[in-house]
Image (cartoon, rainbow, N blue to C red):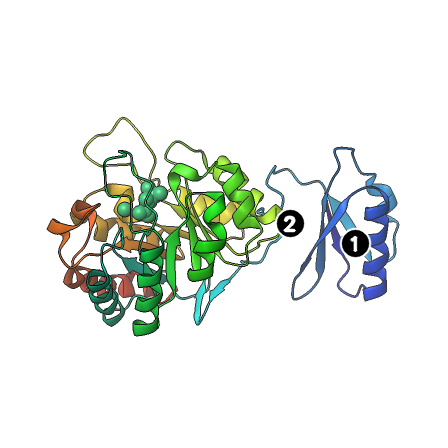
Amino acid sequence: MIVIMKTDATPSQLTNVVALIEQMGGQAHLSRGEERTLIGIIGNGRPFDPDRIEQMDGVEKTMPVLRPFKRASREFHPQDTLVTVGDVVVGGSQITLIAGPCAVESRDQLIEIASAVKERGAQMLRGGAFKPRTSPYSFQGLGEEGLRILAEARDVTGLPIVTEVIQPELVPLVTSYADVVQIGARNMQNFALLHAVGQAQCPVLLKRGMMSTVEELLMAAEYILSHGNTRVILCERGIRTFETYTRNTLDISAVPLLKQLTHLPVIVDPSHGTGKWELVAPVSRAAVAAGADGLIVEVHTHPDQALSDGSQSLKPETFADLVASLRKVAVAVGRTA
Ligand code: PEP
Ligand code: MN
């Protein structure tokens, strides 16, 4: 249930309502808007009596919450959540561009790519140090050495770094280096991992599972939010369908749908979403036109030599062309890039 306070409710009226909610066995979750405060009641399974709450001074009305993802829902938190990472704001008027290789392969490789994407307009650097590969024989990432290289690339370029964590035990290590920690598609419902990043002091980029519904994605976000971490960025990265020409089917409708259902920022990964570098630019433009708050794009200086995902990686020059064209699309939908 949501309690909508009057615009002129006083702090002590708010305190009294929170006390009543707690006395009734609920948890009060405050959302302070510019005009008024909303209180989301996270229940204990028992229904709450709306009349008792509505009789309190300062309360305008109560509303039942229809969505199972209470903290992630726009019903409870109408204003957009902005996730700030250094100087970068994700979810505001500017489209956030995250770019870099699929995996950190070496110091020289990463520093070269990081400098190239920075020069061409990226605001954050991506790169996997722990890679969740389908085959145990494929390159698994450089591990902590990869994290050290990412931190060096951040020092050189000033770009905040986004990198994946694949095990709960590694969350303290990865978050000690990362500016944003990524939960990959294969781990979207790894609840122990969601719990661990929910307790971390680091923004989380949560990717949609390749066989997950939009509601399952939002419930995964709810796990993170309910453990105290409110800085969650959602990412549509394509789902599995019967189509085989593309690696995944990028669900473009998920973007405006998520923007309706949740206050969290929504970005798109056109690289894993298509699997083909030629499709990355058109799909990126579609994503921004559909309301995405940002993009995470794989870029490599030598895609033919990449240890993973070379076929879906843009070269820096193609990335530059993409950025230029995105600027026009962003302006057309009232944003900047
Ligand atoms: C990645 O970003 O490199 C990655 C493995 O993505 P996903 O989890 O979406 O497959
Ligand atoms: Mn990849």
| Amino acid found under the numbered disc labelled 1 | Glu
Nearest the camera: 51 or 107? 107
Nearest the camera: 279 or 183? 183
**x and y, in percent, of residue 280 in the image:** 22, 50
What's the residue at 39%, 43% (across, down)?
184
**x and y, in percent, of residue 65 in the image:** 67, 41
What's the residue at 86%, 46% (across, down)?
23
Res 252 visible: no
Nearest the camera: 331 or 308? 308
Vertical arrangement, residue 156 with respect to residue 31, above or below:
below
**x and y, in percent, of residue 97 in the image:** 33, 61
What's the residue at 39%, 37% (across, down)?
186
The residue labelled by disc 1 is 60
The residue labelled by disc 2 is 76
**Distance of mark 2 from mark 1, alpha carbons?**
15 Å
| Amino acid found under the numbered disc labelled 2 | Phe
